[in-house]
Image: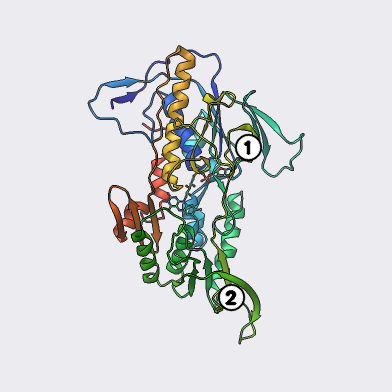
Amino acid sequence: MGSIVQAPALTTQAMPFKVLVVGGSYGGLSAALNLQDLCSGLAPRCGPKPVEGAPVIETPQFNVDITIVDERDGFYHLIGSPLALADEDYAAKSWVRYEDVPAVSQSQNIRVLHGSVKSVDQTSKTATYLPHGLVSSPENTSTLSYDFLVAAAGLRRVWPVVPQSLRRKQFLFEAGDHIRAATTARHGVVVVGGGAVGIEMAAELKLVQPQLKVTLVHSRDKLLSSEPLPDEVKDKSLELLLEAGVGVRMSTRLDKTEEVVDEQGKKAVRVWFTDGESILADQVSLAVSRSVPSTEFLGVNETGVLDEEGYVKIQSSLAFPAETPNWSDHFAIGDLVKWSGIKRCGGAMHMGFFAGNNIHQRMIEIASGKEPAFLKLDEIPPMIGLAVGKKAVSYWPATGVSAGEDVSQAFFGDDLGFTICWNHLGLGNSQKL
Ligand SMILES: Cc1cc2nc3c(=O)[nH]c(=O)nc-3n(C[C@H](O)[C@H](O)[C@H](O)COP(=O)(O)OP(=O)(O)OC[C@H]3O[C@@H](n4cnc5c(N)ncnc54)[C@H](O)[C@@H]3O)c2cc1C
């Protein structure tokens, strides 16, 4: 691959191309920033690094106006949630308001709207937008027109898997209350659900508050039972969890909880399991997955864009299904797409880069008639990096299973991946040079 440098604009469009990105997290930011790079004649920040000395490839530049709409008022490092909901200092670091993200706030091409996209009309290429805090009504809703749309709205996840706040200030209260309740717990915390989220929640809580009794309950005889991963990954996860000091109850379910008064006359919860046993706790956190794609704005199934579960049926170019109106100008990326592989933030950022590239290719096609050279997504095999306290377990098809503190360092650094993601997206740079 040759280097990509500033190149003369291929076209002198009178009007900039308008791009609407729904969702400003890993996927949406990646699409917006990689597209901006390409439209400025720069190498896309998440693409392959240019080889030194290789011939320069000039990419056509375009004027572009990118609007990102997000329900949150900032970039929230979602994968850090298990730690953010256990440690107040980390919570403050994990949510950065968009106005404090230099790559976004200092960009001439990108603006962020705090609110929700309510509907999309693929035929007229318009979307309706409701600003944050306003009740849904025709007077409060405005119309955004676009040339290209990127759907990057992820999954709707329940509390306490992820915080429900939409403003940073409110999030810090939400996390603080949750953390204080756990800190004062005398009988301990029960986490229900031994999927990736439940494992990370239990392990981070125990890591940050070692005095706390933390119990994880899982209905099957293996952790991560719904993931298509080798048993070795599941067994290693259990081993690391026990090593971290988390109590694990397998093959039993939460039956019911009862409010009781303990021997000191204080309120507690008696947690009953389906095997007839019970323990006393102060807090029960449900980490059973009930996440649904955040695709209401794309209508229900009759548009042909969504499958029966609400996932977007993308083509390998990440474009909407071929039979739908203006499909080649509509892209979907990240957790809300129907594609193979375990949902991962790395996957969302990678798809964002592909979408940015493919929109740029469409711009070239519109300007010059040149056939677009789309980047196409391959099938993604199951792979995972799971933080379990001070250690991590990973499974990659090429390298198999690895576990240890070195794996944690490689996958998550010192801050559960915040700096790795921040740097990969170049969020601290006003422009990538
Ligand atoms: C607790 C937890 C731990 C995880 N750990 C890991 C891990 O260790 N490694 C890993 O690779 N992955 C991990 N994941 C998965 C990872 O977080 C997701 O794959 C990733 O967040 C997907 O990114 P995305 O951009 O597609 O969507 P999201 O990150 O979900 O972002 C979607 C954005 O869209 C916005 N939005 C939604 N609807 C609308 C609308 N109608 N209008 C405007 N905005 C909207 C939301 O506010 C949100 O900001 C974890 C997930 C969870 C919940």
Image quadrant containing the N terminus: top left
- Left or right: 284 as drawn, with respect to 249: right
Instruction: Choose between 374 and 382: the one closer to the eye.
Output: 382
Residue hosting label 1:
301
Q: Is residue 380 above or below residue 15?
A: below
State the mark number for residue 272: 2
The residue that appears at 63% across and 81% down in the rendered structure is 266
Of helix, strand and loop, which one carries label 2? strand
Instruction: Choose between 275 and 318: the one closer to the eye.
Output: 275
Q: Amino acid at mark 1?
A: Asn
How far across and how far down the image is residue 390, in percent? 36, 63
Of helix, strand and loop, which one carries label 1? helix
Q: Residues within 10 Å of mark 1 (few under 14, many from 20)?
A: some
Displayed quadrant of residue 430:
top left
The residue that appears at 46% across and 75% down in the rendered structure is 211
Disc 1 to disc 2, how far (Cα)? Answer: 40 Å
How far across and how far down the image is residue 394, in percent? 34, 55
Q: Residues within 10 Å of mark 2 (few under 14, many from 20)?
A: some
Q: Is residue 409 above or below residue 348?
A: below
Q: How many marks?
A: 2
How far across and how far down the image is residue 52, in percent? 24, 29
The response on whether ligand 1 sits within 8 Å of label 2 is no
The residue that appears at 57% across and 39% down in the rendered structure is 307
How far across and how far down the image is residue 28, in percent? 50, 38
The residue that appears at 49% across and 33% down in the rendered structure is 32
Q: Amino acid at mark 2?
A: Trp
- On the question of residue 76 being in view, the answer is yes
